[in-house]
Image (spheres, helix red, strand yellow):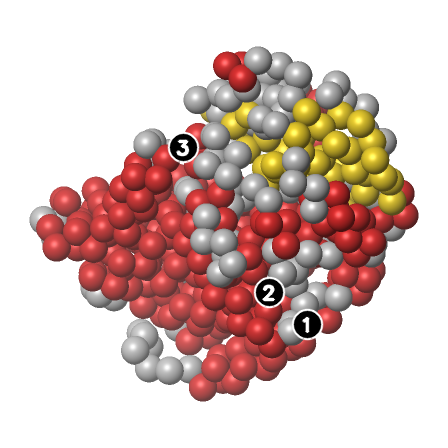
Amino acid sequence: MDDPTLRDPLLDRALLVWSAAMGVLACVVSVPAVGEVLFRGTFVQDADEVIRAWYGRCAFKNASVIPHSHLSMPGWTAVLALGEGLGRLLGLPLTLPGRLVSVAAGAWLLRNGAGLVRSAGGSVRLGRVAAALVACSPAFFLLTLTVYAEVAFAALLVAAFRAQLEGRVRAAALLAGLSPLVRWEGGLVLGLLAAVFASERRWRALLWLGLPYAAYLASNTLHFGDPLRPLANRTTETVFGAWRVLNSRVPGPLLREAAANLAILVSPVVLLGGLALAPWSLRHPRLRPLAFGATGLLATMLLIWHDTEVWSLRVFLPPTVLAVLGCCAAMAASSARVRRVGVGVLVAATLVTALVSWRWIDGLKIPAPGRFRSELGYHMVVRAADATEALERVHDELADPSLRWVLTSHMNANLLRADPTCTLYDHPLHLGVPRLSLTPRFLPRLALPDGDGLWVSHAGPIHEPGCTEVARFPEAGQWLARCRATTPPASRTAE
């Protein structure tokens, strides 16, 4: 067996070249027109991605944005705040710092992935193969160029499981303990390792494991009066739709379409291999935490369905990465013939998925400027358009002292692209639409906010009780209306 503590110079050089190439590509796709053409808006330059970067850039001007950033956990928003804050000082395009952070996280993941396989008894060559398989996954490649948290979350998990394999218990605990602050499902891995450490009576490790998340829950309790409010208010049925285990409201055709889209992005062979990891790992006790982490994440993501969205496909990246690395690590203790067959299957599955993904993406149509496209399981693609004139009109309207708030959807990417300095925060910002929005205190409102305000819509002409259109900029996809609540205050907020 190779010494897992020894460096692999060839892999290090390859990762340096990979990082440089991905960094250049991240700079290129930060220009909306280029990113849209290259990837047809698939993850890159979609609306949710822009709002994450915008929240990060605005955090220094208004610290309340971090808990209010309901599209990212606060740990990832804080990381983006550091990157985008520096980017604002340097005049970098919105989203570029976040993309570069994802590239760095991807390189860290690949290096630790190869090290994990070697720590499980694999050869240097098998470690390189595992890293290459992950790097060639369409989901990993695309998401490494975005500001989404999945690559960083997966990198934390891989580093934690590698540390656990190598007996670095405190490092494993701290890395796993930070993961729920980046993606909520890190709590599943936290619970798994808590059980492992408790069975080994490693009480100090349990403290390192639980401290970051406990601090987060305590902060939520102080700020909101409820430790789970930010997560619950974006996932419960009464607010933004139902996320349930085996949701009975999801029709069969919708589920089949979602499964077909998932198969385009992630190889079914790899997913099935991931589900097979748990029983296989019974032969390899040291790999059980990794195997059950992969299968637990995968099963959870597969079984939780939304009324209309079914799945958010990018969340399958972390269990896919763990499945690939877990399979390679398990094969390290197998015969040479099993390794050859197993690696051959993984290579073939990855190449087929890459081919299918690129052909599918290449066939997608780019929306007209200012308009949008939505694909089941992916995110709304809002085509870039210059909304500067619309933003200027917004500020002209908000100069009226009688206006107390501004309301816009988080999907209004072009308005946020035109507002990299966060001037929308000159008035209390509510995210959503008149019938359902979030207040700056992260409370859902089922009607317009109190008093007079301005609604900026990107979905078309405004027809809403209590709202009167004052301006439209159809070429930028922006419609402005002055609004006043028409319902009693008692019915406006859902606790």
- Number of on-image labels: 3
Tell me: residue 428, above or below residue 349.
above
Q: Nearer the viewer, residue 441 or 297?
A: 441
- The label shown at residue 147 is none
Q: Residue at x 89, y 43 (%)?
A: 474
Q: Where in the figure is residue 122, as x and y percent of width and height?
A: 37, 68
Tell me: residue 92, above or below residue 141.
below
Instruction: Classify the position of the C terminus by image quarter.
Output: top left
Tell me: residue 461, above or below residue 177.
above
Under mark 1, the amino acid is Cys
Residue 3, by quadrant, is bottom left
Instruction: Classify the position of the N terminus by image quarter.
Output: bottom left
Q: Where in the figure is residue 351, as x and y percent of width and height?
A: 67, 59
- The label shown at residue 99 is 2
Say which label, 2 or 1, has the lower sequence index: 1
| Secondary-structure class at tag 1 | helix
Mark 1 Cα shell of 10 Å, populated few (<14), some (14-19), many (≥20): some
Q: Nearer the viewer, residue 394 or 160?
A: 394
Residue 439 visible somewhere in the drawing: yes
Mark 3 Cα shell of 10 Å, populated few (<14), some (14-19), many (≥20): some
For the residues labelled 1 and 3, the Cα–Cα distance comes to: 36 Å
Say which label, 2 or 3, has the lower sequence index: 2
Q: Residue at x 45, y 86 (%)?
A: 9
Quick check: 487 left or right of 104?
right
Q: Where in the figure is residue 111, as x and y percent of width and height?
A: 44, 72
Quick check: 29 left or right of 476?
left
Residue 254, by quadrant, is top right
| Residue annotated with mark 1 | 27
- The label shown at residue 229 is 3
Under mark 2, the amino acid is Arg
Q: Residue at x 65, y 74 (%)?
A: 91
Q: Do the CB atoms of the residues marked 2 and 1 lie less than 8 Å apart?
A: yes
